[in-house]
Structure formats: structure tokens, C-alpha cells
Amino acid sequence: MTHKHVFHISHAHKKIGQDGNLPFWIAMIRASQKVLLPNKARKVLDFGCGQGKFLPVFALMDRLEFGLGVELEVGLVEEAKIHYEQKNIQYAVNERTLFKSYPEYFDAIYSQEVLYTLEDLKAHAEEMFKILKKGGFYFATMGCHIQNPLWSKRRKMIREEEQYSAYDYSLEEVAEVFFNAGFEVGLKRLPVDYFLIYHPEITQKFSNSLSDLVSTNYENKMLFSFWKPDE
Ligand SMILES: C[S@@+](CC[C@H](N)C(=O)[O-])C[C@H]1O[C@@H](n2cnc3c(N)ncnc32)[C@H](O)[C@@H]1O
């Protein structure tokens, strides 16, 4: 199965198994293909890659020349390396000097629900600007923002249960920070085609109900595009 064939979600299941975030990764890739130049092999960064499943899915749906997944949590990077590392997909712990080796290197950067975990968004925006090629895009999903009515519930849970932090940002704040770093900033709802998956505990805990899970995703899960001008 290559990108030349029609993508079916079963191909992703075969590669990475079932995962509640799969509909979001696919949606992000599809939305990005509407603005990225078609039929070009891409160098891609997955920032805050977690278990590293995004890049293998990307390779099924697009042309991946090289993919780098970067994560703070060492254990997750080790896991990603074991399961998904291959010649054109690598994983690394995000250390302070890591990105110095990648000036104007990436065609596209993706981050799925990572922005709200970052304390210094300005430094992040400036760093991503430096490592993107001119004319490149950074795509970032964000459901965790203060305009989401479920945010206070989710923030409490994340702060209690996760290793990473949770900061309060509005969509406007994020837009302003990236605009000031030099990006053209775009925003839309993340168009999710696939089914959101019910779980007897997590759905209730994270979203109140299945119906709220669907409506909050439709209404509040956003996709930013940050474009680095070509000149
Ligand atoms: C909500 S999780 C999302 C994980 C993954 N993107 C996904 O779609 O499942 C946020 C991730 O960002 C990572 N993260 C937070 N700050 C980071 C940083 N400065 N550099 C790299 N990863 C970071 C966290 O460790 C966490 O794994």
C-alpha cells in the first residue's frame, strides 16, 4: 500500500492498531493536503509525537521523504523507536539544541493537541519558524482552549493525570503569537470524517457524554495553519 493507492482506514489500523486519535491525524493530513503542493515528497516534523503513530499514518497517505517525531517524554520516544522507526522515520527526545541542526529544513510541521501544553508559545512559534522552509506550513490542532466549554473539566483531568502541563490559551492569543513570529495565520474547524470512538469510562470522564464528545469536536476542535511566507 502506497500513497498512490486509495487510502482506507483499515490500512492505518494494520500499521498502528486502533487509536482514538486516528480520526484526528487523518483529518489533519487531509486538510493539509488542500494547501500543500501536491505530489511532492515532504520532510515532516511531528512535534509532541507521543507514541509516534502519526508519521506512519502520514506515510500511508502522502509522500514522506523524511519524518522526525519529537517528544519530551523519554519513555514515549523509546516506544516509538521500537515500533515505528525505519529509514525515513526517526524519533528524538526534544532537547534544547535539537532544532539547531534543522535550519529551514521541513516542508510541513504537524502538532496534534500540543500547543496548550507549552508554557512559552512565543519561543515555540519562533523556533518552528526557523526550522520551516520558506513557503512551508505548520498545522496544529487545538481543542484544548478556553473557548471550549469542556475545557475546565478537561484541564482538571489533564493536570491530575498527565505528565505534561495544561495552559489556558484563547484562539486569538495563539493566532497573535504566531502572527508576531512572522507566520500568516489561518484557522478552521478540524473536518473529522471518521467515527469518534466510544469508551465507557473515558468518554464520560473527558466529554460528559458521547453526544457531547461529538458536538465538542465539531464545534471546538480547531485546526490552525501557520504559513511561512516564501520571501
Ligand atoms: C496531548 S499529547 C498529544 C500527543 C500526540 N500529538 C497525539 O496526537 O496523540 C501532548 C504531547 O506533547 C508533548 N510535549 C509537550 N511539550 C513538548 C515539547 N516542548 N517538546 C516535545 N513534546 C512536547 C507531551 O509530552 C505529550 O506527549
Image (cartoon, helix red, strand yellow):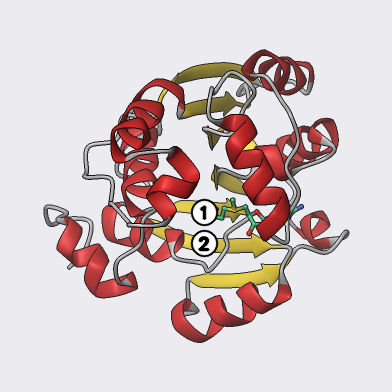
Q: Which residue is mark 1?
A: 43
**CB atoms at circles 2 and 1 under 8 Å apart?**
yes
Image quarter hosting the N terminus: bottom left
- Left or right: 99 in relation to 136: right
Please tell me which residue is depicted at 39% across the width and 48% down the height of the picture. 203
Q: Evaluate whether residue 41 shows in this view.
A: no
To which quarter of the image does residue 5 belong? bottom left
Please tell me which residue is depicted at 83% across the width and 40% down the height of the picture. 119
**Residue sitting farthest toward the bottom:** 82
To which quarter of the image does residue 142 belong? top right
Check the image and report above or below for 87 versus 213: below
Q: Evaluate whether residue 204 shows in this view.
A: yes
Please tell me which residue is depicted at 59% across the width and 40% down the height of the picture. 154
Check the image and report above or below for 138 versus 71: above
Q: Which residue is mark 2?
A: 67
Foreground tag (2 vs 1): 2
Q: How far across and how far down the image is residue 28, in percent?
A: 39, 40
Please tell me which residue is depicted at 39% across the width and 35% down the height of the picture. 32
Q: How far across and how far down the image is residue 138, in percent?
A: 57, 36
Q: How far across and how far down the image is residue 82, in percent?
A: 52, 86
Between residue 130 and residue 82, name the one nearer to us. Answer: 82
Q: How far across and how far down the image is residue 77, in percent?
A: 63, 74
For marks 2 and 1 on the same chain, the one whose residue lies earlier in the sequence: 1
Q: Amino acid at mark 2?
A: Gly
To which quarter of the image does residue 81 belong? bottom right
For mark 2, give the secondary structure. strand
Q: Which mark is residue 164?
A: none
For mark 1, give the secondary structure. strand
